[in-house]
Image (spheres, grey):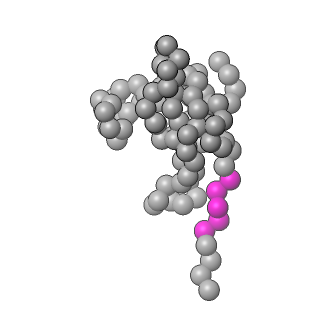
Amino acid sequence: MPTLPEQPHFRFIVGDMVFARETLMNDDGGVPDAAPGAVLAAARTRGVVVRVGHLEAEPRQTLYVVRFEDDAGVLGPPVGCLPEELTQEGA
């Protein structure tokens, strides 16, 4: 019987408030409606986790979808983040 891959441990859950550990950029142009090289979230920007999952090609790699606040406190578009890009330590 084949074994299933080990499920990743999720550090954050949907609804958790998080902060960008460092400035997140659209380096590869992979985020639709954002120019390549655009800032997606400045360091210490507050956001909320809206989805938790993993990369299809690497099931052990956790991926968080986060909506970060803009200067007016309005949540922006969803951004895919790796665990090491996020923290719960406030600004």
Residue 69 location, x and y as percent? 52, 22
Q: Residue furthest top?
A: 72
User: In this picture, is 78 found above or below 60?
Assistant: above
Q: Left or right of 39: which side holds 69?
A: right
Q: Main secondary structure of the magenta part?
A: loop
- 20 falls in the magenta region: no
Q: Left or right of 37: which side holds 18?
A: right
- Residue drawn at x 57%, y 48% is 52
Instruction: Looking at the picture, tell me which residue is in the foreground, 49 or 38.
Output: 49
Would you identify the image quadrant in which residue 91 lies?
top right
From where the camera sits, is residue 21 visible? no
Instruction: Looking at the picture, tell me which residue is in the foreground, 29 or 76.
Output: 76
Q: Left or right of 45: which side holds 13?
A: right
Residue 90 location, x and y as percent? 68, 22
Q: Residue furthest bottom?
A: 1
User: In this picture, is 62 found above or below 23?
Assistant: below
User: In this picture, is 64 found above or below 44?
Assistant: below
- Residue drawn at x 52%, y 41% is 65
Q: Quadrant where the N terminus lies? A: bottom right
Residue 7 location, x and y as percent? 64, 61
From where the camera sits, is residue 18 visible? yes
Please report the bounds of the magenta region as a residue range: 5-9
Callout count: 0
Residue 58 location, x and y as percent? 50, 59
- Residue drawn at x 34%, y 41% is 30
- Residue drawn at x 54%, y 60% is 59
